[in-house]
Image (cartoon, rainbow, N blue to C red):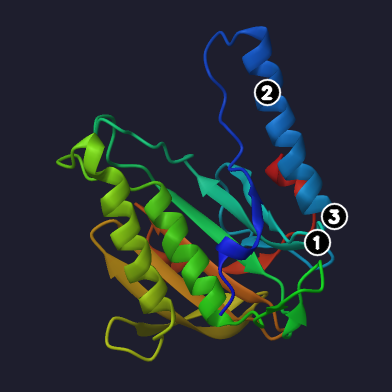
Amino acid sequence: METTSRVGTAGPAPGPTPSPEPAASAGVEAARRQVADGFVRAAFPWYGLDAAFTGPRWLMQVGVSADGTVQHGTTGHGEEPAIRPDGSGPDDERFAAVVTVAASPVRRTGDGTGVLDATSVSSAAWLAGSGLLAYTWPPQLDHALRDDWLEQQTEAAFALADDLGGPEWTTLTLPVDGVPVPFHYRESEFGWVLAGTTAGGAHLGAYGRGMSAYGLGFAVVEDLAAYT
């Protein structure tokens, strides 16, 4: 499967900070514009939670290849998760992120020197699993050990994404544009992850915490303005 190590990532876009310095504020706005531009340039439709979800929505990040082609991206829903390096802060965040991965066959790299694997449902599972880890920091974990912990957990997420038929996964059927679609689903102490393929061929991943995955539905994003 294709992993994010082969593409560049823009984002996630930083959230607003109180009384920012002019330079910092400009940096935040530039990052948000970069992410929004990536979503606009994509040659495939984006997915998010369907209209049953009425809470906040925002754009999280996009992944692009070396030649600038947008390959995947993530939309956020609910409360923007915070990375808390000291383990403090609220532990009751309620959010769900939806990862859209463009269907793509085996292809050559932008410089013509190599070959990239085809995208698959495992690609979506990997991006969702690693996305959840990006916002996970066990309170009892010493700051100096976080990199080692994150590397170990990321390797585990990669292995799980490559074994969707394994015992760690169950099947959960959820609507995508009103059509029931089976998803691979797993839970952990940090949240939940799911991945599936739409009738149109796009691969969807999702992850979240504090919001049950069982009541979710997905739909094509008709207007990106709802996320900006």
The mark closer to the camera, 2 or 3, is 2
Q: Mark 3 points at which residue?
A: 41
**Horizontal and vertical percent position of residue 120:** 60, 82
Q: How many other residues sit within 10 Å of disc 3, few (<14), some (14-19) or many (≥20)?
A: few
Furthest residue in direction left, as rendered: 140
Q: Quadrant of residue 166?
A: bottom left
Residue at 74% from the left image edge and 29% from the top image edge:
30
Residue at 75% from the left image edge and 39% from the top image edge:
34
- Closer to the chain start, of discs 3 and 1, is 3
Q: Name the residue under label 1.
A: 69
Residue at 68% from the left image edge and 74% from the top image edge:
177
What distance separates the C-alpha of mark 2 from that of mark 3?
21 Å
**Horizontal and vertical percent position of residue 35:** 71, 43
The kind of residue on which mark 2 rests is Gly
Q: Mark 2 points at which residue?
A: 27
Residue at 32% from the left image edge and 70% from the top image edge:
156
- Closer to the chain start, of discs 2 and 3, is 2
Quadrant where the N terminus lies? bottom right
Asked if disc 2 and disc 3 are in contact, CB closer than 8 Å, the reply is: no
Q: In this view, does 49 lie to the left or right of 43?
A: left
The mark closer to the camera, 3 or 1, is 1
What is the secondary structure assignment of the residue under circle 2?
helix
What is the secondary structure assignment of the residue under circle 1?
loop
What distance separates the C-alpha of mark 2 from that of mark 1?
23 Å
The kind of residue on which mark 1 rests is Thr
The kind of residue on which mark 3 rests is Arg
* Residue 50 position (above or below residue 120): above
Q: How many other residues sit within 10 Å of disc 2, few (<14), some (14-19) or many (≥20)?
A: few
